[in-house]
Image (cartoon, rainbow, N blue to C red):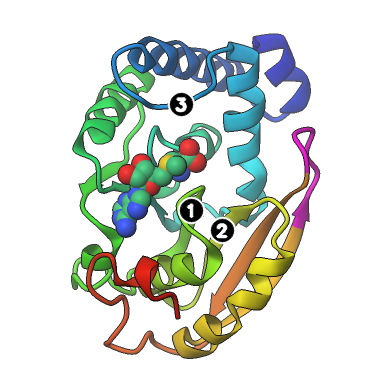
Amino acid sequence: MREMLKAALPQADERALERFEIYARLLLQWNQRMNLTAITDPEEVARKHFLDSLGAQGHIQPGQKVIDVGTGAGFPGVPLLILHPDMELTLADSLQKRLTFLDTLLQELGLKATLVHGRAEELGQNRLYRETFDLALSRAVASLPVLLELTTPFIKVGGTAIAYKGDATEEMKAAKSAAFLLHVKLKEEPLSSKVGKRCLVLAQKTAPTPAAYPRKPGTPNKKPL
Ligand code: SAM
């Protein structure tokens, strides 16, 4: 796994490569006790979790405030933090046991991030988090119209929500009215990937999110904008 990552990430130093190894080992160990990933082979973890998560690398600037919404076992936030330890990262998830894993993981990696337990619908209405981030990331959490409601309240005007997607053509069409209501401009950015078609959908915020959004827990999924 180390050789594969070294070839794919020429910018990664020895400390970063060591951290990816620790991450894969802990993930697979904890996965025997709790459901963290369907992937059980370390090389696959590197390809489908680590390298895929690093797809948004080009959007990370030093010192930026970044939130990963529905981070699960830390994707995409933690691989990005390994290569950019200077960003200010918040990892949010509604399942406490995933945050317990992340707490141990960050200690073992010697990295700092803020862990937040809660649903995005509630955190996005909390003044501590609302419109305070430069970037909101999400991977494999919901369809694009739902995700826009869950993620864009976290970003400042001028900030960007980035959703990791496969083929986003249909979701981009379905998300038009959500983008209008939430005051974001959508753009698709293809990713070069060895694991099928992958892209990033960038939602750039042009005006504050109306106070009504996000709606109460469950509503964005039940009645997408
Ligand atoms: N982002 C990770 C990845 O790419 O492997 C995890 C994906 S997992 C399929 C979805 C995660 O989103 C779960 O950990 C779940 O608890 C979290 N989640 C789903 N809906 C959420 C919500 N409304 N607020 C916060 N977390 C949520």
Q: Is mark 1 within 8 Å of ligand 1?
A: yes
Q: Residue 15 in the image: x percent, y percent?
A: 53, 18
Residue segment shown in magenta: 190-196
Quick one: label 1 or label 2, which is nearer the N terminus?
A: 1
| Residue 62 versus residue 103 in the image, above or below | below
Q: Residue 28 in the image: x percent, y percent?
A: 44, 13
Indicate left or right for 25 with 129 as reference. Answer: right
Q: Residue 65 in the image: x percent, y percent?
A: 40, 58
Q: Which residue is mark 3?
A: 37
Residue at horizontal 69%, vertical 20%?
5
Q: Which quarter of the rendering shows the N terminus?
A: top right
Q: How many marks?
A: 3
Q: Which residue is mark 1?
A: 138
Question: How far is the residue under mark 3 from the one under mark 1?
Answer: 16 Å
Q: Secondary structure at mark 2?
A: strand
Question: How far is the residue under mark 1 from the one under mark 2?
Answer: 5 Å
Report the amino acid beneath label 1. Ser
Residue 12, by quadrant, is top right
Q: Is mark 3 within 8 Å of ligand 1?
A: yes
Report the amino acid beneath label 2. Ala
Indicate left or right for 158 with 187 as reference. Answer: left
Nearer to the camera, 106 or 76:
76
Residue 31, by quadrant, is top left
